[in-house]
């Protein structure tokens, strides 16, 4: 590889294909740190070639090991220090490279570089995460998901460090350590891992009515997404946009997935966490590897300070949304993730998102939760990444040139030349100069008040938007919320905590409180006293945008995982016809057998199972095909896994197609009585597989068939 092609390759790598070689100072540094194991001699960290990497240096073959073995000692010492502190929250995650493309210039509102002109491309790195679990925990825990985007803009790095829910538990950063201590494993026995279903969490939130709105989101199916690729993202806080004329508007950021918004159901999430704890991480990785690049549309809610003053809620309160019916979304661009990291540790683990990283054209609001974040992120990286120079780690280094007089510190990479490291100076011709109004200038929002600790009045209204959320859900979603409260509170050991929480829910919805109370075998308590007696009436009382099921998006079946059961004697021809239609529609079809490997079709054809019912249980798939072929059906009927496989598919409301004799397996699984009533169950003769294929595609595209949900509110 020549020097110039090496540079070009790594430029493309860093930017997901969008960089212009030669304009990116990080490219050279990346090239220096990127290591390709092929074709190289094994060396020590000092570059000394190693002759023997198998044996310790000893005094004789059976003699004692020698202290002078610097090769062994360097290797083991480095190994001893391979782990760094994990993130205190959001420890478990997955990242990918990509780009953001602006639909149009947004200069009317902001001078921020990514929105400067139509079609502008800005490289990004995105990390998705769970919040409470440790690094080695599971993906499908009930939890908030982080959705953090680092834009490598021409004017420096902008980090939009958001979540998949638009509100938060608390209104003020002062309460964040308390919240995190409450949700993390209880300190005396360090349990439970990656779960909010325990006493300390519910003790805290039931004493903090401001968290009620967020609890509704957390107990909804949004907390168990089907995929990182199928969840929304939100900036949560109100931000400011500032244009070149120094005019400012308020703004909320929304990411909408083009893959649709889909979730798991609880029983499925629990089972997946055992069979594949890496379910979401694998899904993201495999989609990108196969060229199915996930996309999101960025939408902005833009409103003026004057408008905000008239709202029934305070836009500085992160426990409140701005309903889309009040301020509609303005679509401004798209995010595409098109390259997996080369190295998980170097990139996904070492990436340092900071809520303080903003650029000219973006500014903070006075949200008191945001203020704490501006401090916290830089501070935590200093411990986590070992010092103040974490911005020099390649994944964190900006594309825009970095020039200032900060010097030294742990792990400094830059080689500053010359003797000037101060400003003003004459010895370096005054460089580097400050940019004046061309640089970042804080929006001059007026401040003239007494120093106080307290909250504005509208912050005291805690329930109107929790009610809005609940009332905007479909019946199935409401049932899932009630079931989630029931489950979580049933894990709480102290009855007074359960009761306090249900008394708070009475203020959200009598219907919800009654269902949760019934599920816990208790009477509905009196409503918790409210902090504010006569709040302003909300502008919006039902918002379809808050329901996942009301607006899942029309996304077909691309990347959907479909299990086709096989065994010796399977009717091969019908499966081939189906396979062709499903894969043409973008689905990923897996042949799943009693074991992996080759099976013989009814007419002797070979069919290979890439998965077995043992290594890939039914709940890992989005849909099921039960095959025709008498001998195969008998073999499957005799296998202990088959019934559970089918039952889980049915229980989780997924599309099922049974061909010919395969119908008997559905009957054996006890779903015979539902067969003719459920639009998610399709039956056809093996010979008619090609004809039914499109109907099956439509049934899979519906994601789920909740009419058969076993936990509706009315039963
Ligand atoms: Fe974070 N948060 N947070 N947070 N947060 C961290 O930073 C913090 C909050 C969010 O993929 C930490 O590098 C405080 C809201 C994401 O690396 C830490 C407060 C939102 C990520 C931290 C909040 C978030 C973090 C831990 C209240 C949604 C993962 C490790 C004042 C808008 C980023 C780290 C990644 C990570 C502090 C509240 C999102 C300790 C003090 C609200 C997505 O700095």
Image (cartoon, grey):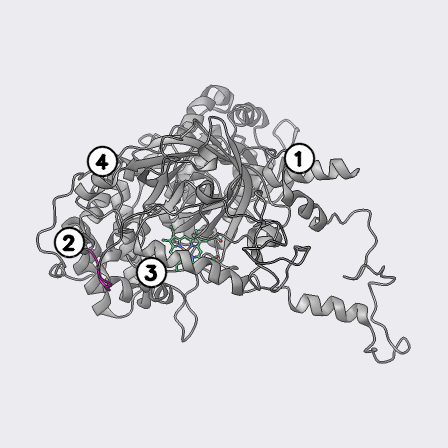
Residue stretch rendered in magenta on the structure: 450-457
Q: Report how far apart the C-alphas of labels 2 and 1 lie in the structure.
A: 59 Å
* Mark 4 or 2: the one toward you: 4
* Mark 2 or 3: the one toward you: 3
Q: Report how far apart the C-alphas of labels 1 and 4 lie in the structure.
A: 45 Å
Q: Report how far apart the C-alphas of labels 3 and 1 lie in the structure.
A: 42 Å
Residue at figure coordinates x 82%, y 73% from the top left: 69
Q: Crowdedness of circle 2 by 10 Å Cα count: few (<14), some, many (20+)? A: many
Q: Earlier in the sequence, mark 3 or mark 1?
A: 1
**In which image quadrant can residue 244 be found?**
top left
Q: How many marks?
A: 4
The image position of residue 435, as x and y in percent, is 49, 44
Q: Earlier in the sequence, mark 1 or mark 4?
A: 1
Q: Crowdedness of circle 3 by 10 Å Cα count: few (<14), some, many (20+)? A: some
Q: Crowdedness of circle 1 by 10 Å Cα count: few (<14), some, many (20+)? A: some
Residue at figure coordinates x 34%, y 66% from the top left: 178
**Ligand 1 has an atom within 8 Å of the beta carbon of the residue at disc 2:** no
450 vs 245, left or right, is left
Mark 4 and mark 3 in contact (Cβ < 8 Å)? no
**Ligand 1 has an atom within 8 Å of the beta carbon of the residue at disc 1:** no
**Ligand 1 has an atom within 8 Å of the beta carbon of the residue at disc 3:** yes
- Circle 1 SS class: loop
Q: Earlier in the sequence, mark 3 or mark 4?
A: 3
Q: Which residue is mark 1?
A: 21
């Amino acid at each position: 590889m020549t020097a110039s092609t090496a540079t070009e390759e790594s430029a493309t790598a860093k930017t997901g294909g969008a960089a212009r070689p030669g304009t990116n100072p990080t490219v050279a540094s990346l090239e220096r740190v990127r290591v390709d194991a092929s074709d190289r001699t094994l060396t020590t960290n000092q570059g000394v070639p190693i002759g023997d990497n198998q044996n310790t240096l000893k005094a004789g073959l059976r003699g004692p090991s020698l202290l002078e073995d610097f090769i062994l000692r360097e290797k083991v010492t480095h190994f001893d220090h391979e782990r760094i502190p994990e993130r205190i929250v959001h420890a478990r995650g997955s990242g990918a490279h990509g780009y953001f493309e602006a639909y149009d210039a947004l200069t009317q509102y902001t001078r921020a570089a990514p929105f400067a002109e139509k079609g502008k491309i800005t490289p990004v790195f995105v990390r998705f995460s769970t919040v409470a679990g440790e690094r080695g925990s599971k993906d499908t825990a009930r939890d908030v998901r982080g959705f953090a985007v680092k834009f490598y803009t021409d004017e420096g790095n902008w980090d939009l460090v958001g979540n998949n829910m638009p509100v938060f538990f608390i209104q003020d950063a002062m309460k964040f350590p308390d919240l995190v201590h409450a949700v993390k494993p209880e300190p005396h026995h360090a349990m439970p891992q990656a779960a909010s279903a325990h006493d300390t969490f519910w003790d805290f939130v039931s004493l903090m009515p401001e968290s009620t709105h967020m609890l509704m989101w957390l107990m909804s199916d949004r907390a168990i997404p089907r995929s990182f690729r199928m969840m929304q993202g939100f900036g949560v806080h109100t931000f400011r946009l500032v244009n070149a004329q120094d005019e400012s508007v308020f703004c909320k950021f929304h990411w909408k997935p083009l893959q649709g918004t889909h979730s798991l159901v609880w029983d499925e999430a629990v089972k997946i966490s055992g069979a594949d704890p890496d379910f979401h991480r694998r899904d993201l990785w495999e989609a990108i590897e196969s060229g199915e690049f996930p996309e999101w549309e960025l939408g902005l809610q833009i409103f003026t300070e004057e408008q905000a003053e008239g709202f029934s809620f305070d836009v500085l309160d992160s426990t409140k949304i701005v309903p889309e019916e009040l301020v509609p979304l303005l679509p401004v661009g798209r995010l595409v993730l098109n390259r997996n990291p080369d190295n998980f540790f170097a990139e996904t683990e070492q990436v340092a998102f900071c809520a303080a990283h903003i650029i000219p054209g973006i500014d903070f609001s006075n949200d008191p939760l945001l203020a704490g974040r501006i401090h916290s992120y830089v501070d935590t990286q200093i411990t986590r990444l070992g010092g103040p120079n974490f911005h020099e780690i390649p994944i964190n280094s900006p594309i825009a040139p970095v020039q200032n007089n900060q010097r030294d510190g742990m792990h400094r990479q830059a080689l500053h030349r010359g003797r000037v490291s101060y400003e003003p100076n004459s010895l370096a011709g005054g460089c580097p100069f400050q940019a004046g109004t061309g640089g970042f200038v804080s929006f001059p929002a007026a401040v003239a008040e007494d120093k106080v600790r307290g909250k504005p009045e509208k912050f005291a209204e805690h329930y109107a938007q929790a009610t809005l959320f609940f009332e905007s859900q479909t019946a199935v979603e409401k049932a899932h919320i009630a079931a989630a409260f029931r489950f979580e509170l049933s894990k709480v050991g102290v009855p007074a905590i359960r009761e306090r929480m249900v008394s708070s829910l009475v203020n959200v919805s009598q219907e919800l409180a009654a269902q949760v109370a019934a599920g816990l075998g208790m009477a509905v308590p009196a409503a918790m006293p409210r902090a504010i007696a006569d709040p302003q009436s909300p502008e919006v009382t039902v918002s379809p945008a808050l329901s996942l099921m009301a607006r899942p998006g029309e996304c077909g079946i691309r990347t959907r995982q479909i299990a086709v059961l096989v065994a010796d004697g399977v009717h091969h021809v019908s499966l081939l016809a189906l396979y062709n239609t499903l894969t043409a529609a973008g689905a990923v079809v897996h042949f799943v057998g009693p074991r992996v490997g080759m099976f013989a079709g009814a007419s002797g054809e070979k069919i290979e199972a890439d998965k077995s019912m043992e290594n890939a249980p039914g709940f890992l798939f989005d849909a099921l095909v039960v095959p025709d072929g008498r001998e195969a059906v008998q073999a499957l009927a005799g296998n202990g896994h088959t019934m559970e496989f089918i039952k889980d598919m049915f229980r989780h409301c997924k599309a099922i197609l049974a061909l010919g004799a395969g119908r008997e397996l559905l009957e054996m699984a006890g779903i015979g009585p539902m067969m003719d009533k459920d639009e998610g169950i399709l039956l056809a003769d093996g010979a008619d597989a090609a004809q039914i294929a499109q109907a099956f595609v439509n049934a899979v595209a519906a994601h789920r068939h909740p009419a058969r949900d076993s936990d509706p509110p009315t039963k």
